[in-house]
Image (cartoon, rainbow, N blue to C red):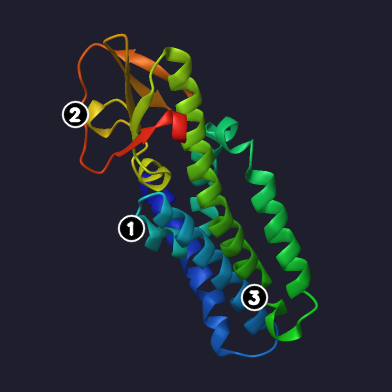
Amino acid sequence: MVLLIAFLFLLIAAAWIWLLLGLFKSGKRWIFGALALQLSLIMSLIVVAMGGAWAAVIGFVWPLPTAVPVTSILLTHYTFYADFYYIALGGGLGLALILSILPPLRIWALLIATTASMALAVPMAEKHSRSLMCQRALALGASEIKRQSFLKSLRHTRTDFLREAHGLTTANEQTYVWSYKRLDWYPVDAQPYAQPGQIQTACGKA
């Protein structure tokens, strides 16, 4: 069974590489090659943003199979993205429409528009993350938080280890850790280790 799965993955990789080699051809082969290259680059970019440096190679060669677990992870945090993703998506679609009327760039519209959407979504996610953390912290009675940047949290999705806490705050001598799944703070018994990279924020000014 394992050998069969490995064979299928190698077959898919070989077929995808064949599509990519169409970039050295002309006509329809080149068009399919350009589309395949864009899908590979988009998936690699997403995987890199999520912290998978070596996994980006897998995303490049197997973009469609890689999209399955990546989509599953992103959907786990849909409640967080739901408040702003449509703005970034709308911006990307608008740009794609503009590019579609420019013949030299039309074929590359997918890659350019997706990259632009991601570039727009990251600062929005950062602002939304900080705002949510502060809102929930103020509700607890805390006035300051320590947090990782959104991209750093995206690269370190584990929250089981307090060393990798996405955010920390203290209220009434109780320490809380931030959870993106709950979109709220939850109490912990021990004082987590505050990493030097954490950003200290006064919530009244956030």
2 in relation to 188, above or below: below
Circle 2 residues within 10 Å: few <14, some 14–19, many ≥20: few
Q: CA distance from mark 2 to mark 1?
A: 26 Å
User: Considering the numbered disc 1 on the image, is that residue within a helix, a strand or a loop?
Assistant: loop
Residue under the image location 54 percent in, 89 percent down: 24
Residue 109 in the image: state x and y as whole percent.
68, 71
- What number is the disc on residue 193? 2
User: Considering the numbered disc 3 on the image, is that residue within a helix, a strand or a loop?
Assistant: loop
Q: What's the amino acid at mark 1?
A: Ala
Q: Tell me which label, 3 or 1, sits earlier in the chain.
A: 1
Q: Quadrant of residue 112?
A: bottom right
Q: Tell me which label, 2 or 3, sits earlier in the chain.
A: 3
Q: Nearer the viewer, residue 185 or 78?
A: 185
Q: What's the amino acid at mark 3?
A: Trp
Residue under the image location 38 percent in, 16 percent down: 186
Q: Nearer the viewer, residue 50 or 31?
A: 50
The answer to whether the residues at label 3 and label 1 have Cβ atoms under 8 Å apart is no
Give the labeled residue for mark 1. Answer: 53
Give the labeled residue for mark 3. Answer: 108
186 in relation to 18, above or below: above
